[in-house]
Amino acid sequence: MRLELESLLALADERVLERGKTLFLRGAVLEAARSRNRLQARVQGSAPFPYRVEIDLNKGEWRCSCPYTWGPVCKHLAAVAFAALEAPEIFARKKLGRSAPVNLKPLLELSDDELLRFLWQLAEERPELMEEFAYNLMQRYE
């Protein structure tokens, strides 16, 4: 299924569209990249960390790391769609990594102690990533 950006925007509530447009116009679409018919970007919303957005036009799939559950399209997705339609030059052309599932088997084979040590080491090496994860995790369960 091929998805057009206009079709994606048509799925959004009017208020979501307005908020997405505002995000786009104020420059909240960051680190935008395009590879063929895939778009990736980070969008700075009201949270302390930008949300990660991916739109695959060929597969007709999209996702955002935000906790929005009131409709199929959030303001962050709308902002990226508006950016792609109205300012395509902000999307750097580069080869984007496939969003294939991560092989968790090696991690799941670790003991609880080993897994906790791994997480603490990750927190020391990439604190910004762990902070973003913790924030988004809390948002999903509030």
Image: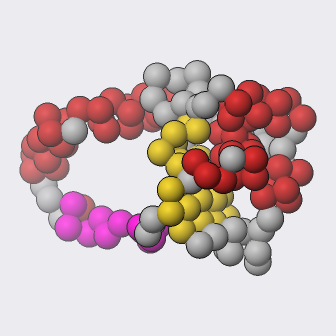
In front of the other: 87 or 142 = 87
> Is residue 13 visible in the rendered structure shown here?
yes
Q: Position of residue 126 (x, y in %)?
A: 22, 38
State the image quarter where residue 121 is shown: top left
The magenta span reads 97-107
Give the residue displayed 82% in from the left and 30% down from the top.
Answer: 18
Give the residue displayed 50% in from the left and 56% down from the top.
Answer: 92
Q: Which secondary structure type mostly characterizes the magenta part of the structure?
A: loop
Give the residue displayed 77% in from the left and 68% down from the top.
Answer: 3
Quarter of the picture holding the C terminus: top right
Q: Position of residue 82 (x, y in %)?
A: 74, 45
Does the stretch in magenta take in 46? no
Does the stretch in magenta take in 101? yes
> Is residue 16 visible in the rendered structure shown here?
no
Say left or right for 63 vs 31: right
Query: Where is 25 relative to 53, above or below?
Result: above
Say left or right for 40 vs 97: right
> Which residue occupies the extreme front position in the image?
89
